[in-house]
Image (cartoon, coloured by chain):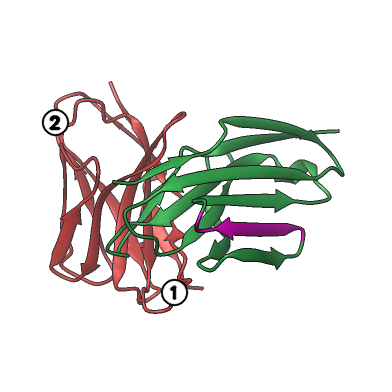
Amino acid sequence: DGGITQSPKYLFRKEGQNVTLSCEQNLNHDAMYWYRQDPGQGLRLIYYSQIVNDFQKGDIAEGYSVSREKKESFPLTVTSAQKNPTAFYLCASTQWGTENSPLHFGNGTRLTVT
Amino acid sequence: GQNIDQPTEMTATEGAIVQINCTYQTSGFNGLFWYQQHAGEAPTFLSYNVLDGLEEKGRFSSFLSRSKGYSYLLLKELQMKDSASYLCAVRNQAGTALIFGKGTTLSVSS
């Protein structure tokens, strides 16, 4: 079955360390996204990529970095510059081209930084 | 810029009907989505509206009025499993990403 895999499900890090969250999709989608979810805040867009080797900042990109070297993979690095990194991180993908293309989400990674 | 407003919380009883409203302000409109999210899980797609009117899909329906910047999600014959957050989202002006509201947490009681 096609889908989006995020790993790991839970991640713990010490303050001051960079950490990379994995996102892999086998849906052959061109577009991939990273969202962050905090209690009461809904989903906020961090970065997105419409095509390999290209990506754009979302609303809250500061303290994060991404790469898109392969169509299937869109890893997110949470750097030590991110002031409040503890959150639930969701990766998504879609194939724009038909109007009602929904986002397909992975199961998320819950990051705790202490 | 874009702004999306939804009520924070709603409660209802099993078997009832509930309407979750969403208002939005956008620079350009490219479609509105509704998602359901159970606690700790990924959001799942419910419906899409780009033209005015009602889209029905089983127990769930979604309505859009572009002139009013308004949508609602209607859930009929509520079940306990419908307890979840419901997220309203609109495409950004370029049509390249979805911008989400803060979500409405629905609690269904027996």
Q: Amino acid at mark 1?
A: Glu
Residue farthest to the top, as pictured: A114
Q: Quadrant of the C terminus of chain B?
A: top right
| Shade of chain B as shown in the rendered figure | green
Q: Is residue B42 visible?
A: no
Q: Which residue is mark 1?
A: A99
Residue A50, x across and y down, in percent: 24, 68
Residue A35, x across and y down, in percent: 34, 47
Q: Residue at x 30, y 64 (%)?
A: B96
Q: Vertically, is B38 above or below A38? A: below
Q: CA distance from mark 1 to mark 2?
A: 38 Å
Extent of the magenta region:
B59-67
Q: Which mark is residue A54?
A: none
Label 1 resides on the chain identified as: A
Q: Is residue A107 visible?
A: yes
Q: Residue at x 48, y 59 (%)?
A: B32
Q: Badge 1 local density, few (<14 within 10 Å), some, or many (20+)?
A: few
Q: Is residue A47 left or right of residue B56?
A: left
Q: Residue at x 62, y 50 (%)?
A: B72
- As rendered, which of B39 and B91 lies closer to the eye? B91
| Shade of chain A as shown in the rendered figure | red
